[in-house]
Image (cartoon, grey):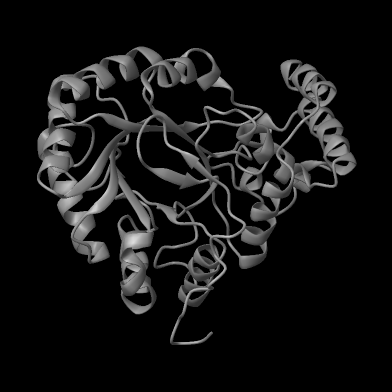
Amino acid sequence: MQENYKADGARYKTMKYNRCGKSGLLLPAISLGLWHNFGFADNYNNSREIIRTAFDQGITHFDLANNYGPPAGSAEEVFGSILKKDFTTYRDEMIITSKAGYDMWEGPYGEWGSRKYLVASVNQSLKRMGLEYVDIFYSHRFDPSTPLEETMRALDYIVKSGKALYAGISNYSPEQTSDAISILNNLGTPCLIHQSRYSMLDRTVENGLLDVLESNGVGFVAFSPLAQGILTDRYLKGIPAGSRASKAHFLKPENITPVLIAAISELNGMAMQRNQTLAQMATAWLLRDQRVTSVIVGVSSVKQLNDNIETLKNIAFTNEEQEKIKAIINDI
């Protein structure tokens, strides 16, 4: 790996950029998530090469949270180290995000949505990454025990104090999202974006959330587009050793049913006809919707990253393809 990094001069020529709602901000269609593979437990040089390659191909959006690792916080520290070594002169070309809402430290102030937790979290995140501000700071989940006004006022304060340029929310229901947008608008800090899980197999956001966002001019970024790896060719012949399902952490073996495998096999056949992998078709399926600003991908290698970026060569679907895919996924 070269020590003195210089970004590829052609990095903006092939990436597709989408406007985030009705804001002035454009995001790359493919964004890089650092939930896995960027903590202290992972290979530093590999993490660094992935981030360099992403930027060289026009990925400007890097998505983090306070508790990404493992251990919690280490992904931000690793990313901060790479920023300092390679990207000091490119900071203004980057969209760097962080979030707070899930368990981060012990005691009553280490999770959820209080002003105490959110403000402390953004301060910690900035210190770990060596930044003066993040571009987007999210409330990572709705807190049923804290008044929504308090959580949104904390985001408003974080933006107006210069710790973040934009405010976002993540994992909120349509009703919670509508209320949050209204509060933030009244405070004068509009909600820029909502981030949630979305894939062919998890279409919860289609039940009202995307409509709420569209009607309010708020962007949407999807994570887990491959449903924890199910929407790849990995499970076509059962559960392989070392896979996420075999470890039964987020993805349970009992979820890999014969009906699911049959549907995945059928989708895989369609992807082959489109000259795509199943993973590429699954990501393209999300990006075909104009309401989806960007899809966050998680990768463990440069090859995986490049395979994801190849998706952008074909994100159009014929009416026949759309109807066939809908029929397959609706039967799962």
Please report the residue visible at 38 percent of the width from the left and 27 percent of the height from the top. Answer: 218
Q: Where is residue 289 in the image (x, y as percent from the top left)?
A: 60, 28
Please report the residue visible at 12 percent of the width from the left and 41 percent of the height from the top. Answer: 160
Which residue is at the front of the view, 159 or 325?
159
Is 185 on the left-hand or right-hand side of 271?
Answer: left
Q: Which residue lies furthest to the bottom in this view?
A: 3
Is 132 on the left-hand or right-hand side of 14?
Answer: left
Which residue is at the front of the view, 10 or 213?
10
State whether residue 34 is above or below residue 5: above
State whether residue 16 is above or below residue 322: below
Total label count? Answer: 0
Q: Where is residue 298 in the image (x, y as percent from the top left)?
A: 54, 52
Please report the residue visible at 79 percent of the width from the left and 18 percent of the height from the top. Answer: 323
Is 45 on the left-hand or right-hand side of 287?
Answer: left
Please report the residue visible at 23 percent of the width from the left and 33 percent of the height from the top. Answer: 112
Q: Can residue 242 be seen in this view?
A: no
**Quarter location, residue 119:** top left
Q: Position of residue 201 (x, y in %)?
A: 65, 27
Q: Position of residue 5 (x, y in %)?
A: 45, 81
Q: Can residue 90 be seen in this view?
A: yes
Which residue is at the front of the view, 124 or 244?
124
Which residue is at the front of the view, 238 or 14?
14
State whether residue 242 is above or below residue 290: below
Image quarter in which the C terminus is found? top right
Is 278 on the left-hand or right-hand side of 61?
Answer: right
